[in-house]
Image (cartoon, rainbow, N blue to C red):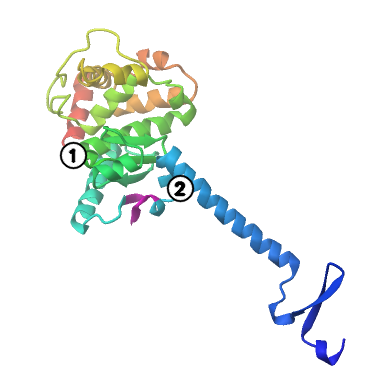
Amino acid sequence: MSERNKGQTAFRVSGEEEQIPAKNFRPPHRMRFVRMIAIVLISGIVALSGMSLTYPPLAAEVCPNCMGFNNSGDQIFVEQGMPAVRMQEAVETIGLARDRVRNFYRDVVGKPDIFVCGDDDCYRRIGGGGSRGMALLDIALFLSPRGNTVTIAAHELSHIELHRRIGITKAYRRMVPQWFDEGLAVFVSDDGRYLKPASAEDRCLASPDGPMPTTREAWVESAQTSGLYAKAACRVSRWISGHGGSDAVIALLQAVANGTSFAEAYDRSDTAVPVARSMSSLQVLGSR
């Protein structure tokens, strides 16, 4: 190589030799690698943008910050810009709601990320409608401003715990009927709108008067107009009190997870115990 060409690298372009300064030279394989990284990043951004439009709850779980949430720790994400006081209240609310679920099951296996919206625009942005809360399988829970209460959060966490215990496939196939899922959520969350206090001998506010919906679709259609929440809570409460308290629910869900039908697990009488004993345990639960 001549003295004039020192520090330069030769490339042939269309039969001619082009001199490129060595300091600006990038090996072809490195250029391809950088290009591949850029393509992956751009594809990810495009995919996330599409996801945020087609299924925003999933987009929020994948990239909370992209959907307007800040990580407050302990798997709690709050809307960006939420005042510090409200943020602290939300964290405390979630803590108390988790306690209610833990007090019932003693050991919690469902541990979803929890997203808290400070206003209705936030909740609409992640796909929420008029509900107080919504769950993404057993992975994430989203709460609207109206759902940021101990009772509502505990209700939704109860659903997630049940689904986690029986398995996502069985939950999707509704192997546990909707009336039991909803009635148990009312019981676990200690919702005074649909149940009497735990100190009552019979907590029912409305007795069930026939079959109740087993699918979510049928439940949603008639739940509010026919008092189904109170009726389902009554039926579940009486079943729990006659079968040994929370242990009976844990055993039932384990049986369903192992392949036993809900009807068979629910109708088993070998776990039944005297009502006086079970009511005592329920009163302790309700007082915590």
Q: Position of residue 138 (x, y in %)?
A: 41, 36
Q: Position of residue 140 (x, y in %)?
A: 39, 41
Graded by Cα atoms within 10 Å as few (under 14), some (14 to 19) or many (20 or more), the crowding at tag 2 reads some
Q: Position of residue 94 (x, y in %)?
A: 26, 45
Q: Residue, x 28% and y 26% (percent of image)?
A: 184
Q: Mark 1 points at which residue?
A: 288
Could you tell me the amino acid type at mark 2? Val
Q: What stretch is highlighted in magenta?
A: 67-77
Determine whether, in the image, residue 141 is placed left or right of residue 5: left
Residue 156 falls in image quadrant: top left
Residue 210 falls in image quadrant: top left
Q: Residue, x 40% and y 46% (percent of image)?
A: 60
Could you tell me the amino acid type at mark 1? Arg
**Measured along the vertical axis of the image, is residue 29 above or below residue 155?**
below
**Which residue is situated farthest in the bottom direction here?**
3
Dominant secondary-structure state across the stretch colored magenta: strand
Magenta stretch encompasses residue 211: no
Q: Mark 2 points at which residue?
A: 62
Q: Quarter holding the C terminus?
A: top left
